[in-house]
Image: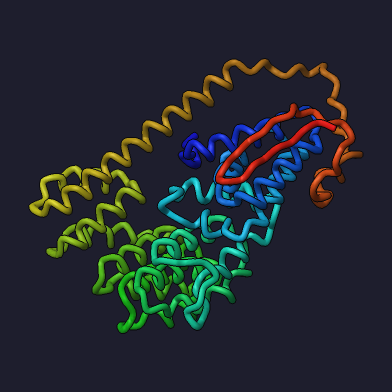
Amino acid sequence: MTPILQLKPEERLVRSYLERALDASSPSVVGLRLVQRFANETPDLFCNAALTLLESEEDSSALRFMTVKLLRQPRLIEMLSDPVRLDKTASIRLFRLLMQHDRSLDIRLAQSLPDRFGASQIPVTPEVCGRALDVLDEVSVGRRIVPILGHLVDHPFPWLSAKATLVVGRRVQSVSWAKRLLTDDRNSRDRANALEALWGLDTQEARALLWEHSLDKNNRVTGNAVFGLHIVGESKAGASVVRMAQRIEPDFRWTSAWLMAKIQRDEHITLLKQMIKDENPGVRRAVLKALVGIRQEQVLKQAEERRLSTIQETLPEASTDQAEAPAPDSSHAWRELAPDPGPPPEPEHIAMRDFNLRLDGRSFSFRDR
């Protein structure tokens, strides 16, 4: 698994002391006080160190206590949305972990973005806004962020409005809403994403809109319309891909290569092999990428089939004389559904040793009493 963060020496030191608090067989007063002091007095060091411990397999009360303190950090949202600090996969992974403890974290993230008047709760750049929208698209379920983000589809920055169009559109999935964004005065990314947001919507109105824009003047818009038709089972979508591959405009040809890689029909793979000699270098790169992607998927599929076949061969045959297994005891199932009781109470036993630490201009001293 990819490391979440590369820690600086002082952050690694904080992490080592936090680990001592989390690894104790039972949470101690000293350990919990240490977590609280780090959270209050060195918040940035605490955040970075604590984030790397979220994936601990130990579900301890001390870990939950640390997570609560982490969720209360005012700069947490800003740090998690910064693409310089975290890659996209890590940002999404951390948000998912934290949302297990705070189901409203996606609302906080959405509210941190520029409002209708351009004001935001955190210092934002187009890159930070884009990362926040990527995360929200993955972790937020339902439509509850739509009222908060709806205005961003009209943002003057084209890249941001396009991302917002996709996030909001996927949750609305409305043909009438998409039509509002498919006008000629909109940038091509907005229009393409408005159609992508309709993927999987199998209605006559949606099919008609996709067919209408399968002949669009922009290759991105056309490509998203054709793939949307393929998803809902339109058999003629494959023929549209072939026609795109034969157009004189290079951008339509490389878009057709992208489509063929996603659809993966036998006739398309044959056509891709012919297109590898295209006169345009951009098309050749797109074709090569498509062929490599198809081959990788085939290899993974074959490996998975072999793995399942091996498992099937090694499984013992079920005995017809074997008694039925008793039903699982569900008497304690309510415990898994019960709300988080919050930070654990301070125990009487103190398990940590005495230590003195000077960090970031502050002294941390704890002693058993």
> Where residue 301 sits: x, y (%)?
43, 33
Which residue ends up furthest to the left in the rendered image? Answer: 279
Q: How many marks?
A: 0
User: In the visual, does 260 lie left or right of 353?
Assistant: left
In this orientation, which residue lies closer to the viewer: 189 or 2? 2
For this orientation, the residue located farthest to the right is 331
In which image quadrant can residue 142 be found? bottom right
Residue 98 is at least partly visible in this image: yes
The residue nearer to you, when weighing 367 against 70, is 367
Residue 266 in the figure: left or right of residue 73: left
Residue drawn at x 21%, y 47% is: 287
Point out residue 362 in the picture as x, y percentages from the top left corner.
61, 45
Q: Could you tell me which residue is drawn at 66 percent across and 49 percent down?
A: 39
- At 50% from the left and 77% from the top, the residue drawn is 119
* Vertical position of residue 281 compared to residue 56: above or below: below
Figure quadrant of residue 144: bottom right
Depth check, front residue: 48 or 241: 48
> Image height check: is 25 above or below 248?
above
Looking at the rendered image, the quarter that the C terminus falls into is top right
In front: 15, or 192? 15
Left or right position of 208 against 287? right
Q: Is residue 104 above or below residue 168?
A: above
